[in-house]
Image (tube, rainbow, N blue to C red):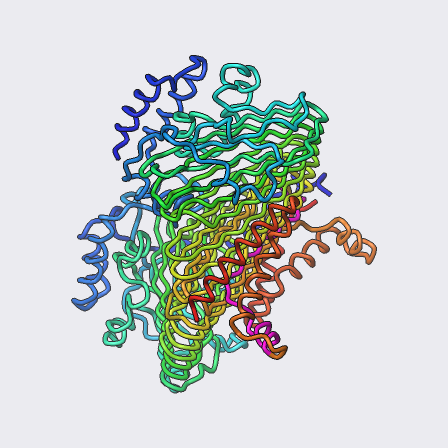
Amino acid sequence: MTLDTYRHAFQRFTENGGGSPSWIRPLREAGLDRFVRAGFPTRKNEDWRFTNLQPIATGEFRLLDPPEALPGLDALRPYLFGHEDWPRMVFVNGRFVRALSRLDGIPSSVQLLSLREALDSQREVVEAHLAKVAVNAPSAFTDLNTAFMADGALLVLPADAVLEHPVHLVFVTAPGAADGATHPRTLIVAGRHAQATVVESYVSLAEQRYLTNTVSEIFLEEGARVNHCKVQLESEAAYHVGTIEAWQGRSSHFESFSFAMGGALSRTNVYTVLDGEGSHVQLDGLYVGHGVQHLDHQTRIEHAKPGCTSREIYKGMLDDRSHAVFNGKVYVRAEAQQTDGKQTNRNLLLSETAKVDTKPQLEIFADDVKCTHGATVGQLDELALFYCQTRGIPLSDARTMVTYAFAADVIEEIQTRPVAEHLEALVRERLERGSARAE
Amino acid sequence: MSGSVESLVQSHYKYGFTTDIESDVVPRGLTEDTIRLISAKKQEPEFLLAWRLKAYRGWLKMTEPHWPNVTYPPIDYQDMIYYAAPKTAKPLGSLDEVDPKLLETYEKLGIPLSEQKRLSGVAVDAIFDSVSVATTYRESLAKEGIIFCSFSEAVKEHPELVEQYLGSVVPPTDNFFAALNAAVFSDGSFVFVPKGVTCPMELSTYFRINTADTGQFERTLIIAEEGASVSYLEGCTAPMRDTNQLHAAVVELVALDDATIKYSTVQNWYAGDEHGVGGIYNFVTKRGKCAGRNSRITWTQVETGSAITWKYPSVLLQGDNSIGEFYSVAVANGRQQADTGTKMIHLGRNTRSTIISKGISAGHGNNSYRGLVKVLPKADGARNYTQCDSMLIGNECGAHTFPYIDVQNNTAAVEHEASTAKIGEDQIFYCHQRGLDTEDAISMIVNGFCKDVFQTLPMEFAVEAQKLLGISLEGSVG
């Protein structure tokens, strides 16, 4: 698909009402202009060195419309972590569906609504924050999203608001969406000392090829705590590019977990700027690949102010011919003295043909800092397997057990227990299927 | 602790003098004629001229790479002298015939070329601008069958060895600077250690750039046959000039079955003044090939000089059970920039590699570690351990690490660790208590930080490296 077709698509998109309200138009046009000027990144771009975007760049993806027949709640139930009582917003083919959502149960001071509505009714807060943080690292996909974002979620927490339950955002691609694209956009603004947990799920109700290009922007004012969890379970024929960008004020606390198990090609970017003294970030993730999946993660932690701490653990398990990429950057600006950063990436290769490219990266311009990073690539610990066998556990079970333990270790970092348990079950199921096939 | 930093920031470069000696230089600029002229001056065989021209034609098609984390003004390759040699009337028969001025220069650098003065039993090949002026201990080495001579002599006396191995590790069109070197290289050292021989002494090359506006392009080739072992050391200095000079050397190492090559570098090219004027651009391609089973190549480098250091001594681990090692200390003080590291390419089975890199940044210096550990599908049981530590002194410098790990075999185990820290106030305080002043305390702590690397250097050079490090960092901490 040539870049010109994106211009035509944009024209049609705005004619069909995508351009309203008018105040957002310049923002979209600027995004489109930057995107068309730069095009899709190639492997010559250091940030995309190990991920070939040809399938996305040459694929013909039309903007998806809402499906003719909406899926029922039953179809979604497997993805709700057994908690239908949580506040929930469901998006089908990128559009908010009120009938499947549940917006009660949150304090009246907290705003939770679809971005489409918010563009009209909440202009002030949206204008003040939208595309304000997701501009730090210029990205073709974020620009594309800004141009074509049709819907998404807006969550605004006033000062001191505390949400009791996690807010679950479910992005569903319905059957019959082949060759379609969605560009969901989420904006979370947590006021001073506000606290919330947000879970984003990306699921497909059919095996089909489509593109999800999602962007989430998160603002944490002084002392705010946001716990963010992304669960990527797209169709294994689909392409998924997701960017999460956070801005952190003084003494704020941001936790992010990225779980990637779906998609033919998936890339998740998690970027945060520690822009207030004493703020803390914890970025964790797990990627589980099989078949010919390509799972890519890029993280960037920017220590901009003194006395901030960052912790990061990403783990990956790769089977069959899957390929994983990890690039984690920790950037310490000159004024960010007393920085304490720790980053770890561990990979387990479960087959002879799986492949990993990992690149942890430190860039440090301050002297009074403590930063470490580590990366490992390896296979299962022979001694652990042997130990299990001496205890009468068959080798195949031992393998599953030791592999599972490797993953469970990082899943435990998820604070929201039902989500952690659900992901643990998914990993276990995948492993058991893998070992059953091996026998 | 930072109060007197500025007042002390001035490094003393004691090798900054120039030698007033008549030189035979070719005109500025680079064309095929320049290459033919260099080749003719050196009376080279036809194959070498053809090889040079092939490299040159390849080079013309290449563009200068700009991916490293360094900045410098564009280099004008036509405004450079590609060949400069101290003028001598006739070929040298013995050391007595060497121009006394040259001997004096090396004396001043602390490298006496006359053998009787040398106690430590180190054979030296001295390279002045583009050519080798003297090689010591040749005869005693020849008795063991070891060939240690300048590259030009090797071309004349052992053309078959040169033809066989030249470019076998770094092909003529490997990269922009390697291609440039292949086209215009003037001299360098050549070492050949035959089957089963352990070289009885340290071999060493001393590089000196003297003439202004010259690029130095030497080429070193070391071959260790089955079961042979050799330890080789290079040292470098240059006069203080306010223009930048390019040093684009190529080093190729070949280790056959059970052979061991240890290559150590103490690089102290002129680094430019505190405003970043002048200094050497050290853009070097160094690569070793563990071609045989159980072979071993060790790179040790202490990089304290150069305005810009940009090099990645690498090892191709081709033979089964072969070992590659890289130990590095890189200092970036003043306005120095260093982008250095290594590449370990695991091709054979049970290959192992170790990388220990220590980067020290001070003043406005920027130090980057960039490394690649690649395990190819056939490298069963490959192991790598990487540790790269950075130390920052002052808050206007930077430390960066860019490790690439690319694993395509599930029996491989690759570990990478990196840390960054500064010299702790409590460490300094402890030293003060014990009666050490701040400068000595820093020197002690920094040397402790670099201990893992210095331990791998031959004894005399370890001492020299420690001193050098002290001088390079002098005044960077108040």
For this rendering, which residue is in front, A111 or A331? A111
Where residue B443 appears, x then y in whole percent?
67, 56
For this rendering, which residue is in front, B9 or A321? A321
Residue B151 appears left or right of A281: left
| Residue A74 in view of the camera | yes
Query: Does B395 lie within the magenta span?
Result: no
Where residue A245 appears, x then y in whole percent?
53, 34
Q: Could you tell me which residue is drawn at 42 percent across and 34 percent down?
A: A139
Q: Could you tell me which residue is drawn at 34 percent across and 37 percent down?
A: A176
Compared with B39, B420 (above or below) is above
Q: Could you tell me which residue is drawn at 40 percent across and 32 percent down?
A: A182
Q: In which quarter of the image is the C terminus of chain A?
A: bottom left
| Residue B237 in view of the camera | no
Which of the 4 quarters of the picture holds residue A210? top left
Where residue B132 appears, x then y in whole percent?
35, 65
Residue B366 appears left or right of B449: left
Q: How many labels does the image show?
A: 0
For this rendering, which residue is in front, A191 or A174? A174
For this rendering, which residue is in front, A230 or B90? A230
Q: Quadrant of the N terminus of chain A?
A: top left
Which of the 4 quarters of the picture holds residue B150? bottom left
Residue A155 appears left or right of A298: right
Query: Does A383 lie within the magenta span?
Result: yes
Q: Residue farthest to the right?
A: B433
Where residue A405 appears, x then y in whole percent?
60, 61
Q: Give the residues in magenta.
A: A366-389
